């Protein structure tokens, strides 16, 4: 048991260390002092305002990570989270701004619509995979490109509010926006968004579905051994569709913290890198809801704290380098720890075999 | 008569996979200008031996001599250079490419940067014409039938100037007329001094077309014959281990209720030879019906059709109700249990704990399913009871299935499938690859369940097992039931003759 926990932690730790190493090399070869850069980052990062910002920024990353993890647990790589959240965010912005209902009805309906739109966008790759055997990776990337065009057309021709320079949907009033959970009141912008609660709920639901229901069990079997699944009466194709639908539904929520909590409308400021950073969080956390949460927070923390580097004449790209390396090294980290684990298991087996051998020799002599 | 120079000599070839010895000191000599058949049951080690000769596997011991020169092959490429070409049973072709592209693939004419497609097409056309192969070299492989694909595979071999051509079960996928033209082509190769080695377990074609025959059983050479001096009966008795099983007579007679029946059941794609061809039978409660047959004669398709995994025509009934339209899950819920052919493929998920494996196939009913929840305690209790009742050793409920030995994995599967007190058990090779102790344990459990009224369809390659356990035997040959026998009236040798198509029901032995 302890070995399993250690092993689970070892992967992310190795990845983060690798990322630190590469970032340090990057800084050193660039002629900067890595130590002072890290010091500045750390001091800025642990300021209350930075921590709150990192926490709020971690929420969409977490949602994106969980969306990716939902498909990963079935062995599917939903690279279409990107398109799914952008289309869903547009739908959510329109619903939140226009639905003539009080907040306690309007907000849940907005969330639901986003889940539905995200799921529908993910259904296309799922169906193509099941009925045409096309890799979901390719089709979901193509769906991302389609999302870009569809969103642009809808925004320009249908949902744009007002004229002139305005390039966003109608402003979402207090009746449609996500309320703040709590304002810590310790300086500027230290209110924690209500989306934190949503993220926690999604995490719990993810855990229950994936780890506690028979449905989650069938997903695991279908991903680990499709043949065994079919013989046990589990239809692998249906699992593929359900896993993609679930992943897309969660992905539909990724853009909402920005739409309902920052911009209060859908416009060009919606971040476009949420999927890749979220994917890094999912890989870092090995698709476990708590691991992904830690991963999302670490990444959001680095992103936030690297912003200060510009003020002290250091390259702000440090954050991007760190995150890029994390994405690569989370794979390497797991490979490394898995290998180490297997080596350890082998040693243990040999040692116990030897000990048993020595005992039988003693016994027979 | 041309001079019969020895082209291939294998001496003392040994190949082990873990604890399993696939080839045990095999000697083989093939002369130029001859067709040499290698016969034996599935799993006897024929294909492994051919992979060694083709450089795809490395022998653990032994030497390979080609035309008098000792060789070691570190890759299939080395074997190709020595003039050896192999046509696999399962074709290795790029479906999206044309015939000529497939043929020249990896040996393209032209420079490293430029493929001389005109020269390539022309040489493939010439090759096809000189060998009398009616193939359109510009056709896309995807659009070819099975016979056409096989010709492309053979062209690949000829293109590389192979003098030793290995054909792994070439006729398994062919209709008789295609097989005839293949044999004609084989004769043309040998007339030019090449040697053809072909693997088969169809004794009639072996006797008709081979010059020499080597029989392999359980990894060892058990006989070498000249085709004109032997008979199918002799070959069959060499192929099949003849040993009288220890029959334990049953105390209770089988019941009268039909628990499982199939009517006119067929599996097969349009335009191909049906793998399972219009099969009908019934299994009564408390009865074990054995299915005998060389592997690949429709048994796998029968299993999948009964389980609801393969598209089939005809009717399957369980306890008198038509279940043809039901899913696998529904069939299992109605009392059908299944011991799969290959425990690693679809019997267990090796990377999951025994607890989860105990739930496999039972995840949609109590005690594993509670509401929407997967009950870990229910699964653990099920696993613990299987481990205890069926004496599964070497693991607890939390150990991975992969940590158990093969025999214990098999006992676990048998325990899981019998644990639900099913009405019908479809058991495929329930004791394959397990030691004697585990085998007798599994047999005891199966007969005990039979005495409690379980109807069982037993598919096995182990004739001793079929003869000891079955109340009735159905023999499968080319997807059809060719004989219905009583185990008391038949011995293993005779059964082997039915299985290889040498003997038909109502005929005297050849």
Image (cartoon, coloured by chain):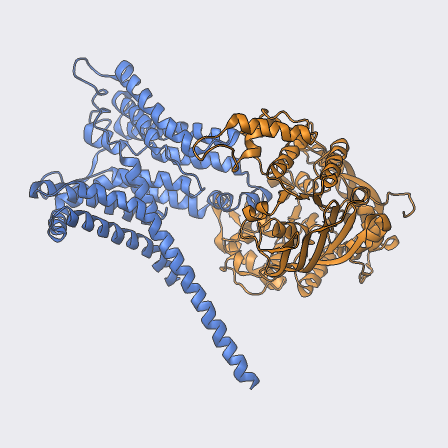
Chain colours: A blue, B orange
* Image-based side of B173 in relation to A123, left or right: right
Specify whether A274 is left or right of B136.
Answer: left
Could you say which is closer to the camera, residue B90 or residue A245?
B90
Judged from this view, the residue extending furthest toward the bottom is A365
Between residues B461 and A157, which one lies in front from this camera angle?
B461
Number of marks: 0
Q: Is residue A243 left or right of residue B506?
A: left
Rendered view: A119 above or below A185: above
The spot of residue B171 in percent (x, y) is: 72, 39
Q: Nearer the viewer, residue B508 or B35?
A: B35
Q: Quadrant of the N terminus of chain B?
A: top right
Q: Position of residue A56 (x, y in %)?
A: 21, 40
Please name the residue shown 21% across and 28% down the image: A269
Residue B442: percent from left, percent from top: 68, 59
Outermost left residue:
A312
Residue sitting at x 18%, y 43%: A318
Residue A117 appears anywhere in the view: no
Residue B81 seen in the current view? yes
Q: Quadrant of residue A169?
A: top left
* Residue situated in front as seen by the camera: B503 or B404: B503
Q: From what the image shows, is residue B237 above or below residue A181? A: below
Say which residue appears at 43% left-offset and 48% top-offset. A211
Q: Position of residue B219 (x, y in %)?
A: 69, 58
């Amino acid at each position: 048991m302890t070995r399993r926990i250690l092993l689970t932690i070892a992967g992310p730790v190795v990845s983060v260390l690798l990322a630190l190493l590469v970032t340090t090399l990057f800084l050193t070869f660039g002629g900067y002092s890595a130590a002072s850069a890290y010091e500045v980052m750390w001091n800025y990062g642990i300021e209350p305002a930075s921590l709150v910002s990192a926490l709020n920024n971690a929420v969409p990353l977490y949602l994106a990570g969980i969306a990716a993890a939902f498909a990963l647990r079935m062995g599917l790589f939903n690279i279409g989270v990107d398109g799914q959240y952008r289309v869903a965010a547009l739908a959510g912005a329109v619903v939140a701004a226009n639905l003539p209902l009080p907040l306690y009805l309007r907000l849940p309906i907005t969330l639901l619509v986003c889940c539905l739109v995200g799921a529908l966008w993910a259904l296309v790759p799922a169906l193509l995979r099941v009925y045409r055997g096309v890799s979901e990776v390719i089709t979901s990337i193509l769906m991302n490109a389609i999302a870009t065009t569809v969103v642009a057309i809808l925004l320009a021709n249908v949902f744009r509010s007002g004229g002139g320079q305005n390039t966003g949907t109608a402003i979402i009033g207090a009746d449609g926006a996500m309320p703040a959970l709590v304002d810590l009141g310790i300086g500027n912008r230290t209110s924690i968004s209500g989306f934190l609660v949503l993220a926690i709920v999604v995490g719990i639901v993810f855990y229950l579905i994936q780890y506690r229901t028979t449905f989650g069990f069938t997903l695991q079997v279908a991903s680990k051994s499709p043949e065994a699944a079919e013989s046990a009466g589990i239809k692998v194709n249906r699992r593929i569709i359900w896993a993609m639908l679930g992943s897309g539904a969660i992905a539909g929520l990724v853009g909402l913290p920005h739409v309902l909590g920052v911009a209060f409308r859908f416009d060009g400021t919606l971040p476009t890198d949420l999927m890749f950073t979220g994917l890094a969080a999912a890989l870092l956390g090995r698709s476990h809801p708590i691991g992904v949460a830690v991963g999302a927070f670490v990444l959001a923390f680095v992103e936030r704290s690297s912003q200060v580097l510009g003020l002290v004449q250091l390259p702000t790209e440090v954050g991007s380098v760190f995150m890029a390396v994390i994405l690569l090294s989370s794979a390497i980290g797991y490979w490394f720890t898995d290998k180490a684990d297997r080596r350890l298991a082998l040693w243990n087996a040999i040692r116990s075999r030897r000990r048993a051998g020595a005992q039988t020799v003693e016994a027979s002599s | 008569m041309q001079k019969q120079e020895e082209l291939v000599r294998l001496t003392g070839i040994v190949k082990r996979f873990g604890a399993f010895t696939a080839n045990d000191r095999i000697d083989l000599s093939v002369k130029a200008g001859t067709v040499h058949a290698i016969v034996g049951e599935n799993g006897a080690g024929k294909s492994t031996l051919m992979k060694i000769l083709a450089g795809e596997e490395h022998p653990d011991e032994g030497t390979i001599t080609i035309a008098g020169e000792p060789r070691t092959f570190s890759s299939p490429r080395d074997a190709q250079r020595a003039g050896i070409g192999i046509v696999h049973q399962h074709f290795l072709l790029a479906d999206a490419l044309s015939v000529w592209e497939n043929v020249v693939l990896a040996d393209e004419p032209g420079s490293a940067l430029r493929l001389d497609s005109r020269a390539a097409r022309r040489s493939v056309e010439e090759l096809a014409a000189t060998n009398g192969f009616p193939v359109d070299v510009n056709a896309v492989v995807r659009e070819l039938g099975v016979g056409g694909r096989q010709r492309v595979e053979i062209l690949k071999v000829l293109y590389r100037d192979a003098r030793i051509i290995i054909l792994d079960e070439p006729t398994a996928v062919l209709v008789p007329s295609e097989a005839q033209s293949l044999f004609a082509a084989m004769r043309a190769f040998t007339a030019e001094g090449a040697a053809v080695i072909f693997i088969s377990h169809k004794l009639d074609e072996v006797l008709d077309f081979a010059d020499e025959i080597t029989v392999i059983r359980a990894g060892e050479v058990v006989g070498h014959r000249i085709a004109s001096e032997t008979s199918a009966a002799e070959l069959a008795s060499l192929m099949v281990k003849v040993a009288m099983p220890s029959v334990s007579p049953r105390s209770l007679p089988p019941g009268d209720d039909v628990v499982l029946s199939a009517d006119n059941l067929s599996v097969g794609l349009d335009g191909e030879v049906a793998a399972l061809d219009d099969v009908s039978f019934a299994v009564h409660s408390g009865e074990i019906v054995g299915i005998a047959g060389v592997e690949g004669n429709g048994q796998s398709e029968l299993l999948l059709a009964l389980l609801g995994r393969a598209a089939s025509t005809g009717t399957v009934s369980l306890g008198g109700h038509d279940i043809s339209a039901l899913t696998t899950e529904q069939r299992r819920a109605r009392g059908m249990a299944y011991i799969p052919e290959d425990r690693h493929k679809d019997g267990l998920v090796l990377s999951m704990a025994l607890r989860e494996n105990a739930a496999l196939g039972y995840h949609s009913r109590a005690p594993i399913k509670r509401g929407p929840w997967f009950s870990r305690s229910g699964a653990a209790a099920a696993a613990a009871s299987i481990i205890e009742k069926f004496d599964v050793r070497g693991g607890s409920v939390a150990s991975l299935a992969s940590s158990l030995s093969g025999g214990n994995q098999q006992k676990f599967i048998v325990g899981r499938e019998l644990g639900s007190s099913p009405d019908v058990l479809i058991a495929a090779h329930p004791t394959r690859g397990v030691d004697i102790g585990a085998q007798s344990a599994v047999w005891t459990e199966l007969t005990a369940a039979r005495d409690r009224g379980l109807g069982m369809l037993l598919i096995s390659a182990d004739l001793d097992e079929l003869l000891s356990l079955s109340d009735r035997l159905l023999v499968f040959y080319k997807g059809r039931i060719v004989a219905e026998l009583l185990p008391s009236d038949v011995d293993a040798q005779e059964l082997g003759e039915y299985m290889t198509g040498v003997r038909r029901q109502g005929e005297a032995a050849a």
